Amino acid sequence: MSLVVAEAITKDYQTGDIIIRAIGGISFAIDPASFVSFIGPSGSGKTTLLNIIGCLDAPTSGRLTVAGTDVGTLDRRQGAAFRGANIGFIFQDFNLLPVLTAYENIEYPLIMVQKVPPEERRRRVTALLETVGMADQAKKRPDQLSGGQKQRVAIARALVTNPKIVLADEPTANLDSHTAHTVIELMKKIRDERRTTFIFSTHDQKLVDEVEILFTLEDGLLKNQNNGEDKP
């Protein structure tokens, strides 16, 4: 059973009297434990689509089912609860809170979103610091970490709520080639171990070369889907 199913979804934005169609009626399916990316030029709809999958925005029409839930039917409160239980986010610029340590940044969603008891928080955060190779950097704040280390913390933060899906918008764009490759391999390892689905939006060829399925968007339309050996 597919984890994400889009059926003819559209997304319109209104600016004054002008309606702009960002997503033009696309359909696709993504299975559990997938490692996939949406690619395309700026303005093609990649980030909009990630926001819809992540319940940060709602489709104008069509149906989007995520983990068995028609997310287009959720109100703001329900969407936030669904997002907190099922989806993690990794951002291009890391989005770590500068006043918190690496440990505290990872712990933050467990306090603010899921209200997890302290002992369980400690167990999860400690385990993920080990998983991403940051146990010895737990007490450092973001300004004391390299770009690759910040992204490892961001990955751990995205995973700490045990999401079914991690959405990542340009997660390697600010990393050098060696660090990007290391981070990609880490995400693949986590996918294999946890069966987490990773869905990316990217221009970065380093990541494009490593994903298993590519969805190509152009002007809000799905132009192509490439799988495995069919990738360019």
Image (tube, rainbow, N blue to C red):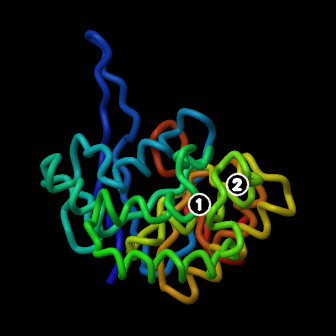
- Residue at horizontal 66%, vertical 75%? 135
Quarter that holds the N terminus? bottom left
Q: Judge the density around disc 1: few (<14), some (14-19), many (≥20) Cα neighbours within 10 Å.
A: many
Instruction: Indicate the amino acid at tag 2.
Output: Thr
* Circle 1 SS class: helix
Choose the circle earlier in sequence order: 1 or 2. Answer: 1
Q: Which residue is at the front of the view, 231 or 207?
A: 207
**Residue 37, relative to residue 97: is it above or below?**
below
Whole-percent x and y of residue 95?
54, 46
**Which percent across, then down, holds residue 208?**
70, 60
Residue 32 placement (x, y as % from top left): 42, 80
Instruction: Report the residue at 13% width, 54% height from top.
Output: 73
Would residue 171 be visible to someone looking at this image?
A: yes
Judging by the rendered image, the residue that carries numbered circle 1 is: 102
Q: Which mark is residue 172?
A: 2
Looking at this view, is 197 or 11 the one in front? 197
- Rounded to the nearest whole Å, what is the CA distance between mark 1 and mark 2? 19 Å
Q: Would residue 209 appear left or right of 81 to someone viewing this image?
A: right
Question: Do we see residue 224 in this rendering?
Answer: no
- What residue lies at 70% left-to-right and 76% top-to-bottom? 133
Q: Position of residue 210 (x, y in %)?
A: 72, 69
Q: Quadrant of residue 86?
A: bottom left
Quadrant assignment, res 117: bottom left
Q: Nearer the viewer, residue 184 or 49?
A: 184
- Quarter holding the C terminus is bottom right
Q: Is residue 42 left or right of residue 162?
A: right
Q: Closest to the observer: 87 or 59? A: 87
- Residue type, numbered disc 1: Ala
Q: Is residue 210 left or right of residue 218?
A: right
| x 30%, y 21%: residue | 19
Q: Is residue 123 left or right of residue 54?
A: right
How many marks on residues?
Answer: 2
